[in-house]
Amino acid sequence: MSRFDFTHPPFDSLTSSERDTLEAAADIVFYGDEELIMEPGTPVDTLFVMIKGLVREMAGDEVIAVYRERDTFDARALVAGHTAHRFVVHEEALVYALPRTAVLALTELNARFGAFFYASISQKFGALAERGGNREWQTLLTARVRDVYAKKPLFLDSEDSVLDAARLMKQHKAKSILVRHGRRVGIFTASDFRDLIIDGTRSDTALGTLCRFDLICCDIDDYLFNALLTMTQKNIQRVVVTEGGSPVGILEQVDLLSYFSNHSHLIAQRLERAGSLDELADIAAQITRLVEILTGHGVKAVQLGRLVQTLNARLFERAWRLLAPPELIANSCLLVMGSEGRGEQVLKTDQDNALILRDGYTSLELDRACQAFSEALARFGYPPCPGRIMVNNPDWRLSEAAMRDRLYHWVYLPENDAQLNLAIFVDAEAVAGDAILLERCHDYLQQLLRDDDSFYHRFARAIEQFNTPLGLFSQLLTKEKDGQAMLDLKKGGIFPIVHGARALALQYGLQERNTFERLARLVEIGRLDRELANDTAEALSFLFQLRLSQGLTALAEGRPAGNLISPARLSTMERDLLKDALGVVKRFKGMLRHHFRLASF
C-alpha cells in the first residue's frame, strides 16, 4: 500500500508509474515547534506536503498563510528556486519532503501536473476543471453526442403516405422518421399518429403535408449537456443529429436517460404534469438533489446554473399557472431578475421577481395570486427577499407604462436603492406570460441611455462598494465571524465581475444576460481584451464552483448555504487559485476604472 496520499491535487493527476517515481524520492521529516523550515536568501530545493501539524508562512511579522494536513508549500518558491517568506512550524509538523529535481522532472512529463507550477491563470483554472471531469469522465461536460447516439435516421419522401411511415417504423421499431421534401427535411413521430387518429386523417395522406420542417438539431460533436439543455428547454423527447449541416441521426430522450443516472428530463416532465403545489414542492427538492448528483459527477457550477435556470423557470411558470387566472397570465409578464435571470444561481437563494401588466388591464385576483405565488416559492425553498423585491410587493407589479416611468426615475432621479434595482432589472428574464412586455421595457431603457455617458460612470461605480480581499504578498484578507476567519466570495470577487460585465453590456446595447456570454460578446465586438476576458471568465467560474462546493458542504452539515467561506478549510491548490482569481478581479476592476473614468468621480 502506498504511504503517500495521491488523492488530492496536484498529485491526483499523476500516472501510476509517476506516482511510484515520486514516492521513491520522498522523505518523511519531523520539525519541532517554532523550527524554521525555509527563509529568504536560502535556496529552495524541496516541495513540502503536510502529514500533520501546522506551519505558518510569514512576511516579516505578518502571517499570510497557515498550512495543515494535505497542504503543499511552496510551489512558487520551488519553481523560482528561492522564497521571499519564512516558513515556521506552529505546531509539531510531520511532512513529506519531495526533492526539487524529482518534482520538476515530473512537470515536464505530465502537463496537467505541471500546470500546478507553471500554467497561466486561465490554464490553471482549466486544469482544475479537467481534473474534476476525470473523476467521472462520462459526464455531461465531457461526453459528446457521437459518444451516445446510435440510431441512424429512417428516410421517406414527402409523397410517401402515413401508411408507408407506419410500416417503416414498425419494421425498424423506430419512433420517428425523417421526410425529404426537395432540399428541406422534416420529421414525423409516433406522437403524430395519435393526433392523426383523433383528427380522422386518411392513411394515404402524403407525409409532406403533415410533418414538421422546423427541426430542432444538435451537431454530432456538440456536448451531450447542450442536447440535454435543448430537450429540457423545448420540452421535447428527441433532437436531430447533424454533421456538416446534414441529418445523420436521431438522439432520443431515452438514450440520455440510459447514459446518465440523473433524471433532469423526468423532472421537466413532472413539472409539466404537476397539478398541485404539493407536487411542485417535491419537485423543487428534486432539483436540489439533482445538483448534488451532477456536482458529484464533475458537472461544473457554470453549466449547472443554466440547467437549474431552465428547470426553475418551468417550476415558477407552472406555479404561476396553478395560482393565477388565465386572463391575468395572458395580460402580464412574470419575470425573474438578478442571478436567476442570468442563469448563474445553482442553489436556492432569495426571491427576485416582478410582474409587468399590460397597460389598461386590471384584475381583482391580482393581489391574491401574487401573494400566493410568493408564499409558494418560500415553501419551495426560495426565501423571501429582504428588500421585498417580489410580486407580492405592489412596487414590483406594475403596468408597462408605470415600469417605464420607474426606469426613468432609476436613471435620471436616482435615490436610495435605484442603482441596485436597475442592476437586477437589467438581468431580467421572462418565465411566464407575454414576454413582449419585458422586451419593450428593455428597449425603452436602451433608448433612455443612448449617448448618456455620465450614467455609465455612475452605474459602474458600484464595483467600488467592496474591496477585493487580497492584500500585499497575495495575502487573503478575512474578517472574523463566529470565531472563524471568513471571506465573502460574492462581495470580494463575484460581484465586481458580474456588475462590470453588466455595465459594459448595457453601454454597448448587448442583449446577453449571462455574464460569460456578455464577456464573450464583448470580445467579439472588440470592446474587451481577449486574454483579460478569458482570465476573468475562468476566475468567475472558479469562484462559482468554490461557492457551490462550500454551499453543498454547508447544507450537508445542516447550515444554510451562503457566500462566506473559510479559507482555512480550503486545500493548498484551492487557496492558491483563490488568490489567482482575486488577482484577476483586481485586474478587471482596474480596466473598468480606466474605461469608465471612475477615478475622476
Image (cartoon, helix red, strand yellow):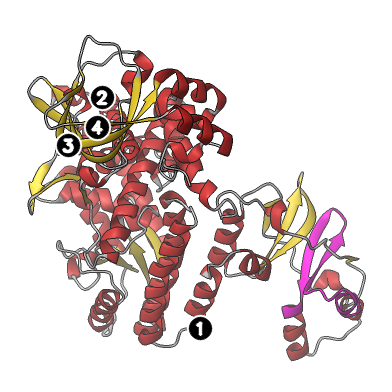
- Residue 523 is tagged as none
Above or below residue 575? Residue 202 is below
Whole-percent x, y for residue 252 in the image: 69, 67
Give whichever of discs 2 and 1 has the lower sequence position.
1
**Residue 355 visible within the image:** yes
Label 2, on which residue? 590
Tell me the residue that label 1 is attached to: 273
Of 93 and 498, nearer the camera is 93
Q: Position of residue 358 (x, y in %)?
A: 35, 69
- Distance Cα–Cα, label 1 vs label 4: 64 Å
Residue 513 x, y percent position in the rendering: 40, 48
Give the labeled residue for mark 3.
Answer: 92
Residue type indicated by callout 1: Arg
Q: Nearer the viewer, residue 551 or 305?
A: 551
Residue 167 colored magenta?
Answer: yes
Can you tell which of label 4 and label 2 is closer to the viewer? 4
Q: Quadrant of residue 120?
A: top left
Of the pair 14 and 536, the residue shown nearer to us:
14
In the rendered structure, which amino acid carries the disc numbered 4?
A: Phe
Magenta-drawn stretch contains 194: no
Residue at disc 3, secondary structure: strand
Quarter of the view holding residue 356 = bottom left
Q: Secondary structure at mark 2?
A: helix
User: Is disc 1 placed on a helix, strand or loop?
Assistant: helix
Numbered circle sitting on residue 30 = 4
Q: Which of the marked residues, 2 or 3, is nearer the chain's N terminus?
A: 3
Pointer 1: residues within 10 angstroms few (<14), some, or many (20+)? few
Q: Is residue 410 left or right of residue 483?
A: right
